[in-house]
Amino acid sequence: MAGVSLIILAAGMGSRMNSDLPKVLHRIGAAPLLHHAMQAGRALDPDRTIVVTGHGADAVDAAARAFDPEVETVRQTEQLGTGHAVAQAAPLLAGQTGDAVVLYGDTPLIRPETLEAMRAARARHAVVVLGFHHHGAGRYGRLIAEGEALEKIVEYKDATEDQRAVTLCNSGVVCADAGTLMDLVARIGTANAAGEYYLTDIVEIARARGLTAGVVICDEAETLGINTRQELAAAEAAFQTRARAEAQENGVTLTAPDTVFFALDTVVGRDTVIGPNVVFGPGVTVESEAEIRPFCHLEGCHISRLATVGPFARLRPGAELAEDVHVGNFVEIKNAILDEGVKVGHLTYLGDAHVGERTNIGAGTITCNYDGVNKHKTTIGPRVFIGSNTMLVAPVTVGRDAMTGSGSVITEDVPAEALAIGRARQVTKPGLAVKLMDLFLSKKKKG
């Protein structure tokens, strides 16, 4: 099959969102709506992706490139309809072979399988439109079709009562040969109630030229477009329901599925167990047979096979856990590598650090990595025992098989196999505790 080009329309303001943020940059699954559309399009292995921007163009450009550095963007300076938006891509597609698929940056739930079905239908039709059945009073364009053959699309504003009674509705997603699509778009006029260039007009234009048009039908949920905060919340719920089901189908145990929240790019291996109230931010990979215990928040991290995390742990960007690592309750890891078999049981912060294999980190340990201006690294060798409540003032290195005494402040490197104690000498005053308590109580009564 010939190559494909994606055209993603992302120029709208989204005034009903009541937001300064461009509509396509609002998030579900910890990712902009635009990224969801781009992710769905990736299933087609596109030769190129073109994003049509408008409102907040610079921010939308940056977000598109963050997802795909090779993306091309083109600006729609006036909002004159969907046909006009697609036409902005014409100069970039001049001479392009293969199909073009039009997607929408504010429609995040299209399945890759649906797009593949549209491309397959292109073997039978010059233009393929994605439709869905809606039985309510939605103001969608209606698809006038006989079986798979599509005769025309009528916008709701221009439809008769009989046409509005048709339940087959237009999603706006279109697939056609790139050259044919741009030729049809160039012929669109504005003779409609809104005075806009409707992309939907290409069906009648194509049929007038003797070309065939067809429809592929998907579930209505896939076509949900985001125009309000309520619809954004509904899309988040739909995304999470789908992500949870996919995780379970792939062999992941979710002990309380409705309380687990995934990101668009979350990867979890089979036979991993995820407890209640776990939140995945972007950039998380969990290998097989790991366990994420309740109330953990993970972002930008990698967790290897047989590792356990939590409960109540936070892994921040740059956290790398090797096999059989244990990170316990109220532990925070940031930009740190924990080698195989490391144990960090409780109440600890490890930032900008490398911890060697089989090392044990005692409760209350802190890597003091920030001096107010710069971050500094802590290096802890293999098989080290870090005593509880140790402060490691970076930059500092603790050698292999070394130990630190509980309550120590370590400001100098510790050689291999050495014991380092850095704390004030204890002074004991017999009987002074009772005298002080009596004094304090006396003052309190007088007050």
Image (cartoon, rainbow, N blue to C red):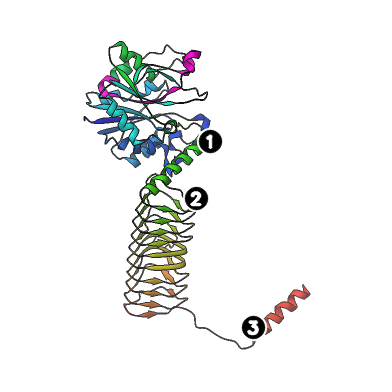
Specify the label residue 72 is tagged with.
none
The magenta segment is: 153-181
Question: Mark 2 or 1 closer to N-term?
Answer: 1
Mark 1 neighbour density, 10 Å: few (under 14) some (14–19) many (20 or more): few
Mark 3 neighbour density, 10 Å: few (under 14) some (14–19) many (20 or more): few
Separation of residues labelled 3 and 2 (CA atoms)? 50 Å
Mark 2 neighbour density, 10 Å: few (under 14) some (14–19) many (20 or more): some
Quadrant in which the N terminus is drawn:
top left
Q: Are marks 1 and 3 in contact (CB under 8 Å)?
A: no
Specify the label residue 433 is tagged with.
3
Residue 394 figure quarter: bottom left
- Residue beneath disc 1: 230
Vertical arrangement, residue 160 with respect to residue 254, above or below = above
**Element assignment for label 3:** helix
Q: Position of residue 158 (x, y in %)?
A: 47, 14
Q: Is residue 354 shown in magenta?
A: no
* Furthest-bottom residue in this view: 430
- Residue beneath disc 2: 259
Kind of residue indicated by mark 1 = Gln
Report if residue 24 is visible in the image. Answer: yes
Q: Nearer the viewer, residue 189 or 342?
A: 342
Residue 142 figure quarter: top left
**Element assignment for label 2:** helix
Residue shown at 31% from the left, 75% from the top? 400
